[in-house]
Image: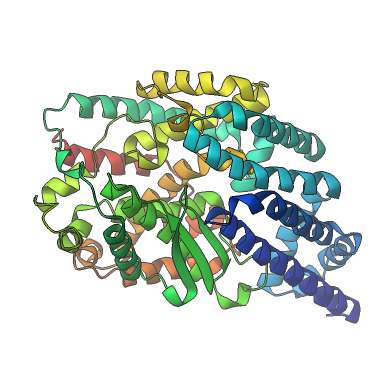
């Protein structure tokens, strides 16, 4: 390696470390804003976040960074770099070419707007007051359209947003995948609805002490292998996970006193995200590769732990007794009854509380709405009516207010258009990975039934977690399963599980 390449690499690495430090500081500020920062400080905090984000953006789009990348990318130089540095150069180049097209002032304005919008969304959701939130959402859509124009649209305008969350994914591919899912899941849902073997859920409609829910959530996280010396659990309006670094991963959940399952499965879901972030190899710490490779792969882990494990019969064969002890006298039913009750398939309004099968229809609704916004020009003012109509069409239910309708998710307030498809992609990745896991881990379900979850975490660390962003989603799924993503695995998993529960 020549001296000039060594100097370029050293400067490049130092800049990446600076950017990562800004990311971590901003992560703390965002976490604080969502977990109890005083409301009166929201405007000033948003400005501070905007200022720091603007400085980070300038570092990540500076001309010298482009010069270092060009030097490192020259024929002969890239091959002299380590695997980590080669990947870091490639990922940074992609981000640089995308970001350098955005004027720093425009970016900073957008960050301030979304910070304010997320806080306003919380208030609007609580009051079911869409008109108070609509102006913020309208501006966020406008900014995203500006960004698309600057980046350059893909095959469709929405493709440009999708790529930020699932690299390489297109609307053409998603239309085919989601169309196939809808075609197979709707008849299955209909068969389930007509089955005479409907689970009883009445015993779940009680008042469950919040403190007992918290204790059980902490217990389950410990069983999963969550490292409390490198993470914490807090409460927020909408559950989320923030990986500041592998030694500081913070998750939140939402406790509902009339629903013991909401915080339970929400905590397991966010715990899946946390296991990913906590177990990235130490060599990636301090680099922008120290995170999940895509939101689809990230969601595969949260959905795997929440649904494949957390909603399985072997899991509750081991942990139902513990749950009963946390709520003495309240869950006096058999474990089979509890298992079936937590796997009821029923059209519902709230995505994060939906069953595994209809959950994908919630995602398809959001996906189709986002396509309409960016490909067809649908306005923020039209979204509540459009939302309600799609819920009537796809799920046969209609929100009574916007709090349980168009305002239920935080994502749009943060500008995360293109994120929602990741959840269903995560379901697909999880189902496919599970088949390989069952083959490679001896007595897989026996481990779950005995509460021996750490070998499963170790397998996932070896196959997924440790790599962070070092491997692409397609490289990971091919390396693990020997084939590209195949949605048929998800269909087979759902058909097998629910045919048993509903005796189809």
Query: In the rendering, at what x and y percent does residue 332 appear?
Result: 9, 52
Q: Position of residue 133 (x, y in %)?
A: 61, 32
Is residue 427 placed above or below 503 in the rendered structure?
below
The residue drawn where x is 32% and y is 72% is 455
Residue 408 visible to an observer of this rendering? no
Pick out the residue farthest to the front: 40
Q: How many marks?
A: 0
Rendered image quadrant of residue 459: bottom left
Quarter that holds the C terminus:
top left
Q: Residue at x 40, y 42 (%)?
A: 352
Q: For this view, does 483 lie left or right of residue 266?
A: right
* Depicted 324 relative to depicted 86: above or below: above
Provide residue 355's location: percent of width, then percent of height: 32, 39
Left or right position of 58 against 473: right
Answer with left or right where residue 348 lies relative to residue 35: left
Q: Which x, y percent locates residue 65?
A: 85, 63
Task: Pick the residue in front: 417 or 3.
Answer: 417
């Amino acid at each position: 390696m020549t001296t000039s390449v060594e100097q370029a690499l050293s400067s490049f690495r130092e800049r990446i470390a600076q950017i990562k430090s800004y990311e971590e500081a901003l992560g703390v500020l965002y976490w604080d804003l969502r977990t109890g920062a005083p409301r009166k400080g929201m405007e000033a905090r948003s400005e501070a976040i905007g200022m720091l984000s603007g400085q980070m953006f300038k570092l990540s789009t500076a001309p010298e960074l482009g010069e270092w990348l060009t030097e490192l990318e020259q024929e002969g130089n890239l091959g002299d770099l380590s695997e980590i540095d080669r990947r870091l150069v490639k990922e940074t180049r992609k981000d640089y070419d995308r970001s350098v097209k955005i004027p720093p002032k425009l970016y900073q304005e957008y960050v301030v707007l979304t910070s304010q919008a997320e806080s306003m969304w919380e208030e609007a959701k609580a009051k079911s007051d869409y008109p108070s939130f609509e102006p913020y959402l309208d501006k966020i859509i406008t900014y995203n359209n500006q960004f698309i124009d600057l980046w350059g649209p893909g095959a469709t305008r929405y493709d440009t947003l999708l790529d930020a969350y699932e690299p390489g994914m297109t609307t053409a591919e998603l239309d085919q995948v989601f169309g196939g899912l809808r075609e197979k899941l709707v008849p299955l849902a209909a068969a389930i609805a007509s089955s005479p073997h409907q689970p009883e859920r009445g015993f779940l409609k009680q008042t469950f002490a919040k403190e007992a829910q918290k204790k059980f959530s902490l217990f389950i996280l410990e069983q999963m292998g969550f490292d409390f010396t490198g993470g914490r659990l807090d409460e927020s309006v909408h559950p989320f996970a923030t990986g500041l670094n592998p030694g500081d991963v913070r998750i939140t959940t939402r406790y509902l006193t009339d629903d013991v399952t909401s915080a339970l499965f929400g905590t397991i879901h966010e715990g899946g995200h946390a296991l990913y972030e906590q177990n990235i190899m130490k060599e990636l710490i301090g680099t922008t590769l120290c995170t999940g490779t895509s939101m689809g792969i990230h969601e595969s882990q949260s959905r795997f732990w929440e649904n494949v494990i957390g909603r399985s019969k072997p899991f509750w064969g081991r942990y139902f007794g513990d749950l009963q002890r946390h709520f003495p006298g309240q869950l006096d039913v058999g474990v089979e009854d509890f298992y079936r009750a937590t796997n009821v398939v029923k059209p519902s309004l709230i995505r994060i509380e939906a069953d595994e099968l209809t959950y994908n229809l919630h995602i398809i609704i959001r996906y189709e709405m986002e396509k309409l916004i960016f490909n067809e020009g649908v306005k923020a003012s039209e979204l509540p009516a459009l939302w309600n109509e799609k819920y009537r069409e796809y799920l046969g239910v209609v929100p009574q207010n916007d709090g349980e309708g168009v305002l239920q998710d935080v994502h749009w307030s943060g500008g995360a258009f293109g994120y929602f498809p990741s959840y269903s992609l995560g379901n697909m990745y999880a189902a496919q990975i599970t088949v390989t896991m069952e083959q490679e881990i001896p007595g897989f379900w026996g481990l779950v039934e005995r509460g021996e979850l750490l070998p499963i975490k170790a397998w996932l660390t070896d196959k997924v977690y440790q790599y962070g962003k070092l491997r692409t989603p397609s490289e990971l799924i091919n390396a693990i399963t020997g084939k590209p993503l195949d949605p048929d695995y998800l269909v087979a998993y759902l058909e097998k599980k629910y045919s048993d529960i509903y005796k189809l």
